[in-house]
Image: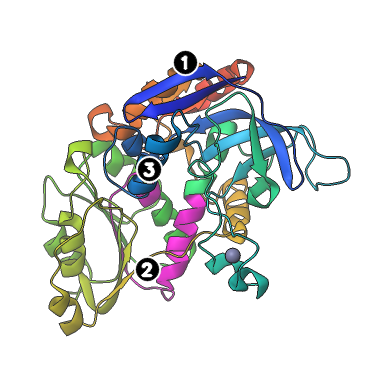
Amino acid sequence: MKAWRLYGFNDLRLDEVPAPVLKPGHVLVEPLCVQPSVTEAQLAQGIPTLAYERVKKRLETEAPVQLFGHEFCARIVEVLPGGSSLHPGDRVAARAKLPCGACSLCASEKSHLCRRGPVIGFDLPGCFSELALLPEIALVKVDDRISDGEAACLQSLSDSVAAVETAQFGIGDSVAIFGQGSMGLECLQIARLSGAGVLITVDVREEACRISRELGADHIINAMKSDPVSTIRELTGGNGADVVFECAGGSPKQGLSGHRTLLQAMESVRSGGKIIGVSWFGRPLELDVDLLRERSLRYLFPDISTLSHLEHTVRLVASGRVRLKPALTHVLRGMESVPRAFEITANKGKHQAINPAQVVLKSKLAKRELGTGNRK
Ligand SMILES: [Zn+2]
């Protein structure tokens, strides 16, 4: 089968490799639609972010290696007889981080807290290939009402569900969200469904602001035109928002905000309020911890998303309560376009992409996908 393998940073090659062999607890799938996550796209170029050291070590000791590809929609082609609740023909999406199944947390039914298990795309091959072998505990069946392109976003959406759950805000609480990329737009919609009061979003891109309005934000601040901190304070009676999601941070070279939006989040949340840190910064930050202490701010990080979160994303999207299609700005076709998808996703600012660029791998599905998602 054909599979993309990384030989080093900035060196992705399409190789012929042996097809994986089915084993207990696993299913064999053919990927239908796959997208690099922003993290994966940055790692492929050697940009420090989440899991950089781990990927660097694998490249130094094991290259070429099949890396990345945890955000996908795939169709099951083979299961072991009697060994699976899934069936050939079922479409599936996955969570990336898996419990180990062997430690004391896993034994005490707290496997959602386990950090020892493998991560799809980092420890196990993902879906930048014609076939993939996946652990069944990672998978959820995709509802017929969800397109392949939408299903490829469910992994990211499950992280956004976990992020909003971590915030645990009350009905009517004011919520501000910095960054209206895919996760910012997801957090907006889930916060809205979860009873948020006034919903304020911030971005520097006109198109992202437009989509944010379409998806239900009450006030959209274009930070190129007005100061988000003073505007959020004005909109919340002078105190600041009860909860602020920070979804814009990261390398400015990739069009992200550095950590400016985190500093703005600290200034635009009310005293005693919560900042939910969704961004990865790729380097240590210098922060005024005394300011956090003085104002009793809670700087919280989302829990790992679980299978329950992933199952909930299927309900949210199938019912139309969360809409993903407005953010699907770049849809490519065919295995050969994978490097292009990495390039677009690593430089979303330059390409005016909202969601990562998707690759439709099965051409017979391409027409339907392109008809609904592609606007380029
Ligand atoms: Zn464990």
Number of numbered tags placed on the structure image:
3
Range of residues picked out in magenta: 157-185
Q: Amino acid at mark 1?
A: Glu
Secondary-structure class at tag 1? helix
Quick check: can you spot residue 375? no
Q: Amino acid at mark 3?
A: Lys
Secondary-structure class at tag 3? helix
Q: Amino acid at mark 2?
A: Gly
Label 1 residue near ligand 1, CB within 8 Å: no
Tell me, for residue 197, which label it has, or none: 2
Q: Residues within 10 Å of mark 2 (few under 14, many from 20)?
A: some
Q: Nearer the viewer, mark 3 or mark 2?
A: 3
Mark 1 and mark 2 residues within 8 Å of each other at the beta carbon: no
Q: In the shown orientation, is residue 113 left or right of residue 326?
A: right
Q: Earlier in the sequence, mark 1 or mark 2?
A: 2
Question: From the image, which quarter does the C terminus lie in?
Answer: top left
Instruction: Give coordinates of residue 308: x percent, y percent.
Output: 62, 60
Quick check: can you spot residue 192? yes
Tell me, for residue 336, which label it has, or none: 1
Q: Is residue 21 above or below residue 163?
A: above
Q: Residues within 10 Å of mark 1 (few under 14, many from 20)?
A: some
Per the image, the residue denoted by label 3 is 57
Q: Nearer the viewer, mark 1 or mark 2?
A: 1
Q: Earlier in the sequence, mark 1 or mark 3?
A: 3
